[in-house]
Image (spheres, rainbow, N blue to C red):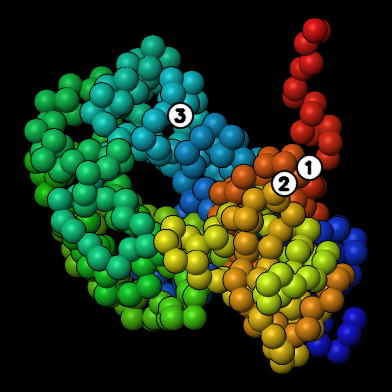
Amino acid sequence: MTANEFAVQGIPISEIAGEFGTPLYVYDAEVLRNTYRELRDLTHPAVDIYLSLKANPNISVCGYLGSLGAGAEVSSLVELETVRRAGIAPENTIFLGPGKTRAELEACVAAGLRAVVCESLEELEALDAIAVESGRADLPVMLRVNPDFHTKGSGLAMGGKPRQFGIDVAVLREGRAVVKGLRRARVIGFHAYMGTRFLNHEDLIHNTREILTTAASLATDLGIDLRVVDFGGGFGIPYFSNETALNTGELTAGINDAVTGFLEDYPDCRLINELGRYLTAMCGTYVTRALYVKESMGEQFVVADGGTNHHMAAVGVGSFVKRNFPIRSLSHYDAEPVREYTLTGPLCTPNDVIGKRVALPEVRPGDLIGVERSGAYGPSASPGLFLSHGFPAEVMVHGGRAHLVRRRDAVEDLLGKQRLISF
């Protein structure tokens, strides 16, 4: 280990890369634990914290957060099986998504979940029919609401405007007959999710208050016994130089105040805060190795062994203007930058750019370069099959040891599912 080399829980990054190869994702379990526990300690005890698997569905990430007390929000059969194998109990799991298949609805009925989140009245009736066919009684259901209030500060709005998600409040207020006509399904609460990457705590507090107010009003209109409200999450983390981290103390104080007031009227109701990016992003580093350093028309390029095929989020998180994630030389972690490099991957497209004009120490072939804050929406949101490179290895450092938690794709992983016909 060199004097200024990056290390995870004391393990040099060169040692991790040497054992598991590059490119790879490295997750620091200490960061994962500290993020969860800080939020858990600051949050009202009536609020359950759930991991949204779409951010990072790695089974060890899920299992570790589950061991700390987190529940799970899933949206596919594989995610449902992931949390089961990870040890998160069905009664601490909810299943949502705007386009559930019959097979998924049947699995939800059989699984004994805390709740199935229905996103239309038609889906609610279909789920009720499946529960009748299966002989399942008293199936707990939440209704996803598309609220009629607006919010600001989201990197990607998921509610409060025309969306495929949930049921418009106006439609739901007219749905009492549907709810009362259910035979086996029982509506116990509501779910709302306004958007992602909120960095202003006041916006999140506003959303929480409005969602709880809407849930109370709908419970009265529909005549249900309100037992659970999922007020979403959307807590952001700062990726870019002009962004500031959430004020967690002010945020949780405001949410706790809203929850306390709500519980005065609904003392038996529990709340869910579902989070993905906030829980997992900070623990992860995407590690690539520089293959070549070259100049083109006056611009310095580092061509690495991994790129946007593994980390599509680094393209810009939905922004029309390319902004760089935090990118560091891991081989020379504390060295001063000396020039700007454009960091690219191995793909045959000019769009394979992880970072533009990144200030780094001098880069030489073989150096390790890391994209930080990459524990969310890495492999799960990337075109890993482009050029058939496959998905990278994932490693979790826990208790001072590096554990392989997903092996990298091999040739047979990619070709074994294909069939060559005779010509």
Q: Residue at x 53, y 67 (%)?
A: 36
What is the CA distance from the residue labelled 1 to the residue labelled 3?
Answer: 30 Å
Q: What amino acid type is highlighted by mark number 2?
A: Phe
SS state under label 3: helix
SS state under label 1: loop
Q: What amino acid type is highlighted by mark number 3?
A: Cys
Q: Which residue is mark 1?
A: 409
Q: Nearer the viewer, mark 3 or mark 2?
A: 2
Height in image: 393 above or below 45? above
Instruction: Decide if residue 372 is in sight here.
Output: no
Q: What amino acid type is highlighted by mark number 1?
A: Asp
Answer with mark 1 or mark 3, whichever residue precedes in sequence. Answer: 3
What is the CA distance from the residue labelled 2 to the residue labelled 1?
Answer: 5 Å
Instruction: Decide if residue 187 is in sight here.
Output: yes
Q: Which residue is mark 2?
A: 391
Contact, CB < 8 Å: mark 3 with mark 2?
no
Q: Quadrant of the N terminus?
A: bottom right
* Observer-nearest of 300 and 103: 300
Q: Residue at x 27, y 42 (%)?
A: 163
Horizontally, is 320 left or right of 207 in the view?
Answer: right
Q: Quadrant of residue 198?
A: bottom left
Horizontally, is 109 left or right of 147 in the view?
Answer: right
Q: Which residue is mark 3?
A: 108
Q: Residue extending furthest bottom? A: 336
Answer with mark 3 or mark 2, whichever residue precedes in sequence. Answer: 3
* Observer-nearest of 133 and 336: 336
Answer with mark 2 or mark 1, whichever residue precedes in sequence. Answer: 2
Contact, CB < 8 Å: mark 2 with mark 1?
yes
Q: Residues within 10 Å of mark 2 (few under 14, many from 20)?
A: many
Q: Residue at x 49, y 57 (%)?
A: 276
Q: Position of residue 196 (x, y in %)?
A: 38, 59
